[in-house]
Image (cartoon, helix red, strand yellow):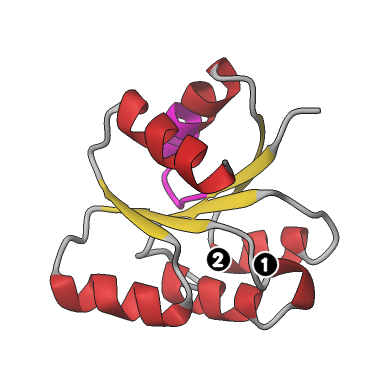
Amino acid sequence: MAKKIMTVDDSSSVRQMVGLTLKGAGYDVSEGVDGQDALNKLKTAQVDMVVTDLNMPNMDGITLIRELRALPQYKFTPIVMLTTESQATRKQEGKSAGATGWIVKPFKPDQLLGVVKKVLG
C-alpha cells in the first residue's frame, strides 16, 4: 500500500508541484492550505509523513509541528519543512518544535524524493 503524505502550503502552485512529484513516485498525497486546515484534516486521517511550509496564514508551520507532536499518533511521524527560509535560527526553531528535516525552496524534485525516501525508510 502506498505511503500517505500530506503537503501543507498556502501556495496552490507549490502544493501542485510537490503533489505531482510525490504522486509520480507512487505516494498517496493529500493537501492542506494552511496549518489550521492541515491540523483539522490530520486529526481525523492518519498520514505517514507531513511536508509543510513555514510561513502561512491562520497557523504557521512551526505551530503546526508543535500541535501535531502533541497528538499521540503524530509523535514520531516524519515532518519536513519546505520553505524559503534558510536562516540557522529558523532551522533551530523548527528542529526544537519537532521537525525531522528542512528543504529550502525552490527545491529539485530529486532532492524532495531523496529526503522522503530517507525519512520514510
Picture residue at 55% right of the left edge, 19% below the top:
25
Residue 91 lies, with reference to residue 79, above or below; the image says: below
Residue type at tag 1: Leu
Q: Quadrant of residue 28?
A: top right
Q: Position of residue 119 (x, y in %)?
A: 50, 48
Estimate the x, y position of residue 95 in percent, counting from the top left. 37, 74
- Residue drawn at x 27%, y 28% is 108
**Image check: 119 left or right of 115?**
right
Q: Say if mark 2 contacts mark 1, CB within 8 Å.
A: yes
| Nearer to me, 121 or 51 | 121
Looking at the figure, which quarter contains the N terminus? top right
Residue placed under numbered mark 2 in the picture = 35
Residue at image location 67% in from the left, 83% down from the top: 70
Amino acid type assigned to the residue bearing label 2 in the image: Gly
Residue 2 occupies which quadrant of the picture?
top right
Single out the residue that lies furthest toward the left. 87
> The residue tagged with tag 1: helix, strand or loop?
helix
Q: Which residue is mark 1?
A: 39
Question: How packed is label 1: few (under 14 Cα within 10 Å), some, or many (20 or more)?
Answer: some
Please provide the residue range marked out in magenta. Answer: 8-18
